[in-house]
Image: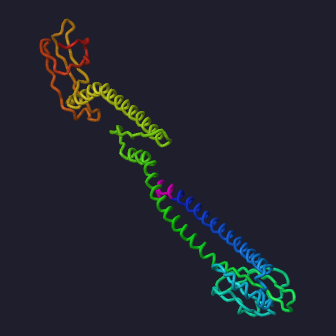
């Protein structure tokens, strides 16, 4: 994975965690606010019941003033809001309910109704229903002069009301996903522009050879990446200077060594072309003591000392005149019976 992809992956991971934490925190806050709102709604309905019981409308003239009748008149006047329902309990059994059909009817649950009928003071609680959790409040009611005892039950369907919160969180999640994708695209482009000098450094390093050190990186800006590009260009300048000095040294050394090497080579070739000749190993001659008119005996030996003397060819002996030219190459012979003379 390239550095560009790793940087983008880490950035997207951080953004994703931030968005997920934000969504979770938002959902938690909204649910807490919902619970608080439902509790306030139960308390508000309890206050409305007490205000109704204190008003003349609770016991109008000419109408019965029993608990069941008073709670019935209150349910007729007070309509429930969305995701809530009311019903009354009279003498331990469910009596009436609000006109709006609830998500689920709890007044038909005898066990639940019997438990609420035993309450002697206002009570609150939570119950699990077929549509999820529900919060309830029960307010016992007694009418002076009436032998009966009843209660008003206020039910708030929490999970049903939380559907709106879930819808809001779902919309936020969709928007967060779209924002994450957009941030990824923008981050990919921005990371590419930021890391462009790094790619140029890599490409320049791949194209640099011993014979071409002229490649340089275009530096823009004054950040760390631009500083890296300038440092790389400076390094290339030093390398180019060093290689140029090395080439100059090699050229100068080759020029200085070319002349003596040529001379040595010429001597070696000349020595290789010179033929091998026999050389005199000794010369014997008999001369008169009065002059050089005598006979010289010259013994010629081969270069190879391994050849026996008996098998060597005989060299004729003849008088040598001083005016006779000496055979080349000139050697100083060894003369027997006289003094050594230089041949002419």
Q: Nearer the viewer, residue 256 or 122?
A: 122
Left or right for 318, reference 122: left
* Color theme of the render: rainbow
Outermost residue, top side: 290
Question: Mainly helix, strand or loop, the magenta region?
Answer: helix
Report the residue at 65% width, 87% height from top.
99
Q: Nearer the viewer, residue 37 or 128?
A: 37
> Image quadrant of residue 297?
top left
Q: Is residue 141 left or right of 167 when viewed as pictured?
A: right
Q: Report whether 23 appears left or right of 293.
A: right
Which x, y percent locates residue 76?
A: 69, 85
Q: Is residue 6 magenta?
A: yes
Residue 114: image location, x then y, percent: 79, 91
Number of marks in the rendered image: 0
Task: Please tell me which residue is depicted at 82% across the width and 80% down the height of the picture.
Answer: 122
Residue 305: image location, x then y, percent: 29, 32
Q: Quadrant of the C terminus?
A: top left
Q: Quadrant of residue 109?
A: bottom right
Magenta region, residue range? 1-8
On screen, residue 59 above or below 278: below
User: Does 196 lie within the magenta span?
Assistant: no
Identify the residue at image location x=77%, y=91%: 62
């Amino acid at each position: 994975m390239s550095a560009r992809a790793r940087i983008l992956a880490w950035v997207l991971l951080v953004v994703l965690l931030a968005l997920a934490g934000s969504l979770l925190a938002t959902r938690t806050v909204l649910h807490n606010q919902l619970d608080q709102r439902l509790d306030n709604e139960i308390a508000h309905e309890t206050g409305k019941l007490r205000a109704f019981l204190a008003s003349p409308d609770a016991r109008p003239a000419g109408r019965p003033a029993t608990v069941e009748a008073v709670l019935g008149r209150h349910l007729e006047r007070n309509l429930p809001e969305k995701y809530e329902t009311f019903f009354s309990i009279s003498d331990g059994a469910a009596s009436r309910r609000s006109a709006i059909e609830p998500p689920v009817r709890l007044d038909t649950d005898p066990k639940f109704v019997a438990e609420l009928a035993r309450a002697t003071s206002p009570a609150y609680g939570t119950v699990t229903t077929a549509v999820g959790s529900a919060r309830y409040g029960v307010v016992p009611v007694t009418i002076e002069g009436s032998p009966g005892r009843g209660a008003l039950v206020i039910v708030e369907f929490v999970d049903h009301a939380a559907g709106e919160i879930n819808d809001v969180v779902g919309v936020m999640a969709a928007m967060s996903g779209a924002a994450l994708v957009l941030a990824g695209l923008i981050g990919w482009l921005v990371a590419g522009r930021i890391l462009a000098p790094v790619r140029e450094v890599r490409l320049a390093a791949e194209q640099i050879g011993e014979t071409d050190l002229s490649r340089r990186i275009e530096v823009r800006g004054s950040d760390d990446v631009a500083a890296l590009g300038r440092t790389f260009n400076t390094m290339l300048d030093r390398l180019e200077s060093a290689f140029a000095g090395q080439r100059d040294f090699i050229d100068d050394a080759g020029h200085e060594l070319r002349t003596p090497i040529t001379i040595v080579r010429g001597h070696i070739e000349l020595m290789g072309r010179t033929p091998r000749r026999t050389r005199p190993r000794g010369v014997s001659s008999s001369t008169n003591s009065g002059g050089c008119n005598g006979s010289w005996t010259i013994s010629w030996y081969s270069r190879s000392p391994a050849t026996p003397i008996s098998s060597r060819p005989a060299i004729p002996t003849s008088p040598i005149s001083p005016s006779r030219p000496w055979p080349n190459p000139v050697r100083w012979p060894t003369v027997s019976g006289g003094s050594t003379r230089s041949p002419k």
